Image (cartoon, grey):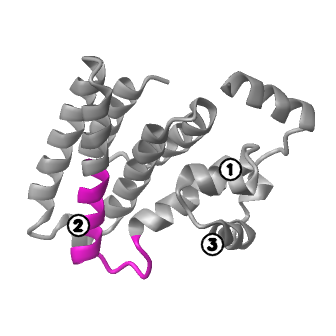
Amino acid sequence: MDLASDIKTLEERFAGKDLVGLRQLSSEAAIEAFLKNDSSFVELSVIAYSCSKLLEKQYIVNSPEWNSFKESLLRLLAQSRVSFNEGNFERGKALLHNSMMLVESLSTSIGRFVNSLISKARLKIGADMYARGASLGVAASFSGSDKKDLNEYIGSTKMLDKYVTLSVKQRLQNAKEAV
């Protein structure tokens, strides 16, 4: 996976209201973050998952703030993608982070979420990493979620039933490939 092309995919799926595609991108980026040890993929994953949750809520999509938010987010993502393509990684990361903060701002101002949407996305990402072989501590660290909260979240889902557990040999091989 290439960060710039993944941001382009995020732009397209968000603009096209592709909820399933956004969630798939979120999961793929979470695994990529773990394998490449790159926090930018975590932020991409958080944005993709959060956007899918926002698009599910008609009261958000129909709100007066939505069109301005959508334009601003797509502009920030495009600027981030261009920066990564030009090799300006620091600017690209900063713009990606600003995109995530914009999502958080909208969800806080008009969302009816019990917990922060970004926090929920981080838990989901951490759980995806854990289900694919990362230790609980590594998954919490990479995703930016609290270890205790992540453990509770994993325990309350059927997520572990969806994946085949990796053998120690396979985990070791994955770790070697990541380095």
Q: Secondary structure at mark 2?
A: helix
The answer for how far apart the CA atoms under marks 2 and 1 are is 29 Å
Name which residue type carries label 3.
Asp
Residue lying farthest to the front in this orientation: 90
Residue 85 located left or right of residue 70 = right
Q: Quadrant of residue 177?
A: top right
Question: Can you identify the residue that label 2 sits on?
Answer: 106
Q: Secondary structure at mark 3?
A: helix
Question: Can you identify the residue that label 1 sits on?
Answer: 138
Name which residue type carries label 2.
Leu
Image x and y of residue 141, in percent? 60, 53
**Image position of 123 with respect to 23: above or below:** below
**Which marked residue is nearer to the observer: mark 2 or mark 1?**
1
Classify 10 Å Cα crowding around label 1: few (below 14), some (14-19), many (20 and above).
some
Q: Are marks 1 and 3 in contact (CB under 8 Å)?
A: no
Residue at 18%, 33% (x, y): give it.
Answer: 79
**Image position of 46 with respect to 57: above or below:** above
Question: Can you identify the residue that label 3 sits on?
Answer: 149
Which range is magenta? 99-116
Classify 10 Å Cα crowding around label 2: few (below 14), some (14-19), many (20 and above).
some
Closest to the observer: 135 or 56?
135
Residue 150 located left or right of residue 1 = right
Closest to the observer: 100 or 7?
100
Q: Secondary structure at mark 1?
A: helix
Classify 10 Å Cα crowding around label 3: few (below 14), some (14-19), many (20 and above).
some
Mark 2 / mark 3, whichever is N-terminal: 2
Image x and y of residue 70, in percent? 17, 52
Residue at 51%, 59% (x, y): give it.
Answer: 122
The answer for how far apart the CA atoms under marks 1 and 3 are is 14 Å
**Which marked residue is nearer to the observer: mark 2 or mark 3?**
3
Mark 2 / mark 1, whichever is N-terminal: 2
Q: Is residue 152 magenta?
A: no
